[in-house]
Image (spheres, coloured by chain):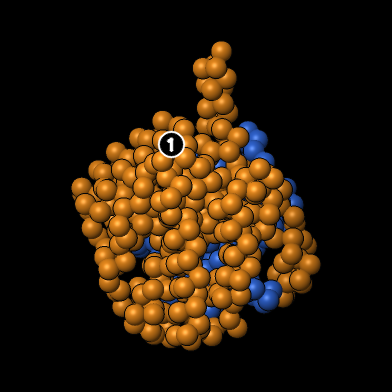
Amino acid sequence: MIFRVRFAAIILLLGTTAVFAAEPTPLPSSRPLSSEQLAKAIKIDSLTIPTPGELFAAFEKPGKPDWAGQYRTPIPMTYRNRGKIALNLGGLIADGFIAVQAQDSQQVKNIGTDIIKLAKALGVSENVLSRGNSISEFAENSEWDALQEELEATQNEVKASMQSHSDQDLVILVSLGGWIRGTQVVSASIVKNYEEQSAKVLRQPAVVNFIHAKMNEIGPDLRKDPLVKAVSDQLAAIEKLVTFPPGKSPTLEEVRKLNQAVTKLMDEIQNKTEAK
Amino acid sequence: MRSRVTILFGLAIFALGAPLRAQTDEEVEAHKLVLDLTGAFSNEGFKLRDGHWTGMIKPQERALIAVNLFAGNQYWFSAAANTKAKKISVEVYDESGKPVMTETYNSGDKASAGFSPTSSGQYFVSIGLLEGEPTTFCLVYSYK
């Protein structure tokens, strides 16, 4: 019976996609849009939130940073708290993108293995688990572009699996974990070697605002979770730290403050004291 | 090849964070059409985001989606509609709602707009149905 229900859920999952009611506004084009029109724009996790890979691609345009210098020591694989696992899973996927930027096959394989271990802990589908093999294969063959796409596909599949298991509240935590880790790495690199042009990528107030709004929609049980609450509470301050006038770069001191804030969050997220 | 499998598998997974329902044949068709269009950008080194957005649009109307882009990257936003559409458009607006100058490609029921932002932040992508009957569209984007 359980198998049948699961099978039906998988069929439903494979045969569906998210469709969002467009809120059409009349043409003609080429005129500025009103604030009412902008407020009605659709926002979806899978397109409105950029991937860490997208951030890293922009960041390395002026000059390739020392990506390998941004590796961190392996995180525990034994977390019990589902919110914590989801946040760390997002962080690990960002680590995967870092390893791809560094073109480090072994590191990509190591992280791919860890991603699958954490995903298993959340009880995700077999489809996600098979992604681990693909990641290894692409890393083995140094197919870096394919790896970027595979990492994002893996993340989306994890999220889809969460939704099918009524864990939709965890989805935004995966995105948030990836955003925090990506921002930590980029801000740390900028602090080491400040360049105005590179620092421009840190202007992301709308991303944080969107994530914060989604965090406010999660169920009361998960929202009461101490880690989730702590992370959510700090987002308003972080939104201010990534808000600058259009086209303006943050100063070195502003980047340093942002780095300190996201590093503090990352430390809380990967804190081992709650691991088994 | 594997990337294409990944992309095709994306047909079966979600753009996340919203209510789900069965994907219609028209949505599948629009997604297939837009993936055909983005193949050219992939050949130019653009990476395709795994997510996509499908919806319905009526003549002389537009649908808007918010995206967050980075200064330094180049982007192409591509949309396709099913055969009921005779002409669609893709346009980009900055966070204040001002139109952004883009390179454009238009082939009736398919259209793309490309640009390189000089400021990181939120932008809005508009899909408009200029001629034709109410139709289903699909939007994706690529970056490098």
Q: Colour of chain B?
A: blue
Chain painted orange: A
Total tally of numbered discs in the picture: 1
Most extreme residue toward the top is: A1
Mark 1 belongs to chain: A
The answer to whether residue B5 is above or below residue A151 is above
User: What residue is drawn where x is 59% and y is 52%?
Assistant: A226
Q: Secondary structure at mark 1?
A: helix
Question: Is A9 situated left or right of A41 in this image?
Answer: left
Q: Which residue is mark 1?
A: A121
User: What residue is drawn where x is 55% and y is 17%?
Assistant: A2
The x and y percentages for residue A262 are 48, 67
User: What residue is drawn where x is 50% and y is 70%?
Assistant: A261
Quadrant of the drawing holding the C terminus of chain B: bottom left
The x and y percentages for residue B58 are 74, 52
The answer to whether residue A11 is above or below residue B5 is above
Decide if residue B21 is in sight here. Answer: yes
Quadrant of the drawing holding the N terminus of chain B: top left
Front one among B25 and A121 = A121
Front one among A221 and B7 = A221
Amino acid type, callout 1: Ala
Front one among B31 and A15 = A15
- Residue A132 is drawn in which quadrant? top left
Front one among A6 and A122 = A122
Question: Is A113 situated left or right of B29 in this image?
Answer: left
Decide if residue B78 is in sight here. Answer: no
The x and y percentages for residue A202 are 49, 74
- Residue A15 is drawn in which quadrant? top right
User: What residue is drawn where x is 47% and y is 66%?
Assistant: A264
The x and y percentages for residue A186 are 40, 71
Crowding at label 1, few (<14), some or many (≥20) Cα neighbours within 10 Å?
Answer: some
Most extreme residue toward the front is: A273
